[in-house]
Image: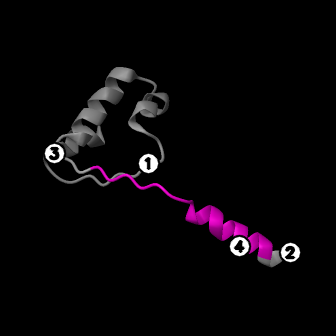
Amino acid sequence: QIFSERYEKGSIFLTSNLEFAEWAKVFHDERMTAAIIDRLIHNSKIMLFNGPSHRLLDQQKKTKKDQ
């Protein structure tokens, strides 16, 4: 409902660690998921970031420090 209300009226900033192909597992409805993705990517800019997890690196540093 949030996506429908905001469609072409304002910006939505969304982050996810899942690829679009995996979203149907979350929403449990492939048609609805396709509609959501269609509205999200219409006139959008998609930025993909790859790299190490900073949370994981911070936790590893903390663990080493505590040992």
Q: Amino acid at mark 3?
A: Asn
- Is 48 rendered above or below residue 65? above
Residue at figure coordinates x 71%, y 73% from the top left: 61
Q: Are marks 2 and 3 in contact (CB under 8 Å)?
A: no
Mark 1 to mark 3 CA distance (whole Å): 19 Å
Residue at figure coordinates x 51%, y 58% from the top left: 51
Q: Amino acid at mark 4?
A: Lys
The magenta stretch is: 46-64
| First-in-chain label (1 vs 2) | 1
**Number of callouts in the render?**
4
Residue with the mark numbered 3: 43
Q: Are marks 3 and 4 in contact (CB under 8 Å)?
A: no
Near-viewer residue (26 or 62)? 62
Lateral position of residue 63 relative to residue 38, left or right: right
Residue with the mark numbered 1: 16
Near-viewer residue (14 or 61)? 61
Residue with the mark numbered 2: 67
For the C terminus, give its image quadrant: bottom right
Mark 3 to mark 4 CA distance (whole Å): 41 Å
Please tell me how crowded label 4 is: few (under 14), some (14-19), or many (20+) other residues with Cα within 10 Å.
Answer: few
Residue with the mark numbered 4: 61
**Is residue 9 in the magenta section?**
no
| First-in-chain label (3 vs 4) | 3
Q: Amino acid at mark 1?
A: Ser
Q: Position of residue 57 (x, y in %)?
A: 64, 66
Q: Secondary structure at mark 1?
A: loop
